[in-house]
Image: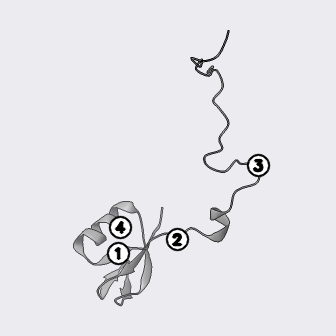
Amino acid sequence: MRVPMIATKAMTYATRQLRADEPFEAADRGQARLLAALGRAKLVEAKPSEEAREDKPGGSPPGNRAPRRGRKPAPHADSED
């Protein structure tokens, strides 16, 4: 899985000459963590797209979830059974 990053210093990565503040993709998470730990690059913060923020069709908004199946509601003390 490729990991988007930004070089913080001029360096060579995967046969490419990168300048500071130049975006690139690390080959995997392990290399991305190593580059970040060495201070050579920083991870690109993922910004959720407008489509991802909107409610998806057929889904319920958070907080309005349906009750779980198989559970009975707790009896109320003031209910007459």
**53, above or below 74, in the image:** below
The extreme right residue here reads 58
Q: Between marks 2 and 4, how big is the CA–CA gap? A: 18 Å
Q: Look at discs 4 and 3 and give the one toward the viewer.
A: 3
Residue type, mark 4 in image: Ala
Residue at horizontal 25 percent and vertical 68 percent from the top: 37
Q: Between marks 4 and 3, how big is the CA–CA gap? A: 37 Å
Q: Which mark is residue 58?
A: 3
Tell me if mark 1 has few (under 14), some (14-19) or many (20+) residues whose alpha carbon lies within 10 angstroms of its own: some
Q: Quadrant of the C terminus?
A: top right
Tag 2 residue: 47
Tell me if mark 4 has few (under 14), some (14-19) or many (20+) residues whose alpha carbon lies within 10 angstroms of its own: many
SS label for mark 2: loop
SS label for mark 1: strand
Tell me if mark 2 has few (under 14), some (14-19) or many (20+) residues whose alpha carbon lies within 10 angstroms of its own: few
Q: Earlier in the sequence, mark 3 or mark 2?
A: 2
Residue 38 in the image: state x and y as whole percent. Answer: 23, 73
SS label for mark 3: loop
Residue at horizontal 68 percent and vertical 62 percent from the top: 54
Q: Earlier in the sequence, mark 1 or mark 3?
A: 1
Q: In front here: 39 or 52?
A: 52
Residue type, mark 2 in image: Lys
Q: Earlier in the sequence, mark 4 or mark 3?
A: 4
Residue type, mark 1 in image: Lys
Residue 74 in the image: state x and y as whole percent. Answer: 58, 20
Image-quadrant location for residue 39? bottom left
Tag 1 residue: 42
Tag 4 residue: 32
Q: Are marks 1 and 3 in contact (CB under 8 Å)?
A: no
